Amino acid sequence: MSTIHAPARSTKAFAGPPPRVLVIQAPYYDKVVGGMLHGAEQVFVEVGVRHQVIDVAGAYELPAALRMAIQQTAEHYDGYLLVGCVVRGETDHYTFICDAICNGVMQISVETGAAIGFGLLTVDTLQQALARAGDDNHNKGSEAAHALLGQIALRRRWGL
């Protein structure tokens, strides 16, 4: 089996104020999600992103929390980063949960046009998750942060 290497990503430069991001994390697998958050925060530091982190009970709650965050008016965010992990078990529960989360986030994304970085690991084992949450170029939190910054830059380009 060959190893697939993640592409090198450059950090976006932003005109105007630094982006404000809300990170919504489901820290059930705290070492995994913490590693992904650390990867994302390293990207944020490069750009000067100001961010706030909130926790939800589990990955299933990510779409609802995202919807609430977008609807709230007390604070404006330029984008939202979702971070969580679902590890396959012995039942169909995994499939239903992963499908519901992905469909929920995509529906919110399409309906609202919000800039969203989606860092949900859906893996067979905890070891696979840990391999995607380390301090290297395979960190999926870092990748999701780069994707989010690209979406924020696109919204700003189009004046949204």
Image (tube, helix red, strand yellow):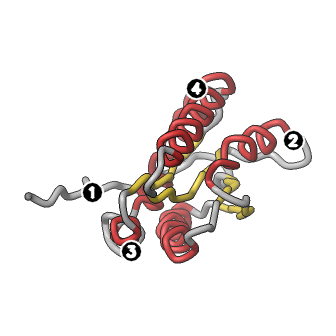
Dot 4, how many residues are within 10 Å of its Cα: few (below 14), some (14-19), or many (20+)? Answer: few
The crowding category of the residue bearing disc 3, from other C-alpha atoms within 10 Å (few below 14, some 14 to 19, many at least 20), is: many
Marked residue nearer the N-terminal end (1 or 2): 1
**Which amino acid, mark 1?**
Ala
Q: Residues under labels 3 and 4: Cα distance?
A: 35 Å
Between marks 4 and 2 in the image, the one whose residue lies nearer the viewer: 2
Q: Which residue is the extreme one toward the right?
A: 74
* Residue position marked by numbered label 4 in the rendering: 158
Q: Nearer the viewer, residue 115 or 96?
A: 96
Amino acid type at circle 2 is Gln
Instruction: Specify the label residue 72 is tagged with.
Output: 2
Query: Observer-nearest residue: 105 or 18?
Result: 105
Quarter holding the C terminus is top right
Determine whether 113 is above or below 120 in the image: above
Tell me the element at label 1. Answer: loop
The residue labelled by disc 3 is: 134
Tell me the SS state at disc 2.
Answer: loop
Q: Earlier in the sequence, mark 1 or mark 3?
A: 1
Count the marks: how many? 4
Quarter of the image where one finds residue 34:
bottom right
Give, as a three-letter code, the residue at label 4.
Trp
Residue that extends furthest to the top in the rendered view of this protein: 111
Q: Residue at x 63, y 67 (%)?
A: 27
